[in-house]
């Protein structure tokens, strides 16, 4: 409450406007605006990593490569093996249209799948317990020699690892943004203290203690930072709202936002920014006041 109420006589020591006030407001606003996007990136990549991990861990593919007159028979044989495999929830052969859609990004929408020597694909969905990949491969080699099992392990792990690293990078960016904001606020506080050195000396002559003087600077700069951070947070949220919503065909690039309870996270940024300003300004004020002794 003392931080909010303040002391009128002490507050007059701190300039209400000028370079330091503008620098503090601008730094807090810009840094919080950037922090909103860094937070959105971290949360979005976290969702992406979880989704990739869940989907790819449960999905596998069997590729049937055989002469055209044997593909149908080997596909049916592979499906029979999968029907009796423990850990397989469902299995189905992809239709011609589905395989055409998979090739469309590379060959166009009108690729003649029927005329190309394309292997037949079988989609396999695992149960939560999963299946024995080595055992299934042995059974497939005996029943359907042209069947090749791909459990996505080779490319699933790098994707999930990349998403997790990107999430960590987002949180690291937030820490760096907080450090940069603390540095700017410290510079502004030092400038304000240096500009009011003579006033501080007069206050000391009349019996004011350093803690009393420092409290005025801490309060003023903390409130300025909180105000700037609040504006930056609101502008960041508005900018996030204008981003495209998450869509299946858009993937990661259209999912950079907050979902559900994640919208509460940006609200924490102004109080955190105010805490950073409080600690940085208090440390700077006590140090500068000590040097002026």
Image (tube, rainbow, N blue to C red):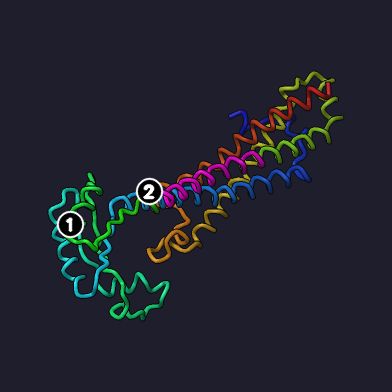
For this view, does 18 lie left or right of residue 128?
Answer: right
Residue segment shown in magenta: 156-181
User: Counting other residues with Cα less than 10 Å from the Cα at mark 2, is it few (<14), some (14-19), or many (20 or more)?
Assistant: some
Please provide percent x and percent y for residue 235. Answer: 57, 55
Please provide percent x and percent y for residue 8. Answer: 71, 32
Residue under pointer 2: 50
**Residue at 76% over, 42% down:** 20
**Residue at 32% over, 50% down:** 54
**Residue at 21% over, 52% down:** 138
Q: Which one is in front, 205 or 277? A: 277
What SS does tag 1 mark?
Answer: helix
Q: Which one is in front, 253 or 212? A: 253
For this view, does 235 lie left or right of residue 287?
Answer: left
Residue contact between numbered discs 1 and 2, judged by CB atoms under 8 Å: no
**Residue at 19% over, 71% down:** 70
Is-magenta flag for residue 110?
Answer: no
Q: Check the image and report above or below for 117 versus 230.
A: below
Magenta highlight: main SS: helix
Please provide percent x and percent y for residue 75. Answer: 19, 66
Task: Report the quarter where the N terminus lies.
Answer: top right
Q: Check the image and report above or below for 98 versus 115.
A: above
Q: Which mark is residue 142?
A: 1
Say which label, 1 or 2, has the lower sequence index.
2
Task: Report the quarter where the C terminus lies.
Answer: top right
User: How many marks overall?
Assistant: 2
Please provide percent x and percent y for residue 108. Answer: 40, 77
The picture quadrant where one finds residue 81 is: bottom left
Q: Which one is in front, 243 or 119? A: 119
Between marks 1 and 2, how big is the CA–CA gap?
A: 36 Å
What SS does tag 2 mark?
Answer: helix
For this view, does 288 lie left or right of residue 271?
Answer: right
């Amino acid at each position: 409450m003392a931080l909010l109420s303040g002391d009128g006589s002490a507050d007059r020591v701190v300039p209400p406007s000028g370079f330091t006030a503008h620098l503090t407001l601008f730094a807090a606003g810009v840094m919080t605006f950037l922090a909103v996007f860094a937070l959105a990136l971290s949360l979005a990549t976290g969702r992406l990593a979880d989704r990739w991990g869940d989907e790819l861990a449960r999905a596998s593919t069997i590729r049937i490569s055989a002469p055209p007159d044997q593909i149908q028979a080997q596909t049916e044989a592979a499906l029979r093996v999968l029907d009796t495999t423990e850990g397989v929830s469902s299995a189905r052969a992809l239709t011609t249209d589905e395989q055409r859609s998979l090739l469309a990004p590379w060959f166009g929408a009108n690729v003649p799948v029927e005329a190309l020597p394309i292997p037949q694909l079988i989609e396999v969905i695992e149960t939560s317990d999963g299946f024995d990949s080595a055992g299934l491969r042995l059974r497939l080699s005996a029943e359907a020699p042209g069947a090749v099992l791909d459990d996505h392990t080779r490319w699933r792990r790098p994707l999930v690892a990349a998403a997790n690293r990107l999430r960590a990078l987002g949180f690291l960016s937030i820490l760096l943004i907080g450090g940069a904001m603390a540095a700017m606020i410290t510079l502004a506080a030092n400038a304000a203290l240096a500009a009011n050195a003579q006033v501080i000396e007069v206050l000391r002559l009349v019996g004011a203690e350093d803690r009393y003087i420092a409290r005025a600077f801490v309060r003023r700069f903390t409130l300025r930072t909180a105000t700037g951070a609040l504006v930056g947070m609101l502008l960041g949220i508005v900018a996030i709202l204008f981003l495209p919503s998450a869509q299946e065909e858009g993937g990661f690039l259209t999912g950079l936002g907050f979902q559900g309870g994640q919208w509460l996270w940006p609200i924490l940024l102004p109080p955190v920014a105010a805490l950073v300003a409080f600690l940085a300004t208090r440390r700077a004020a006590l140090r500068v006041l000590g040097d002026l002794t």
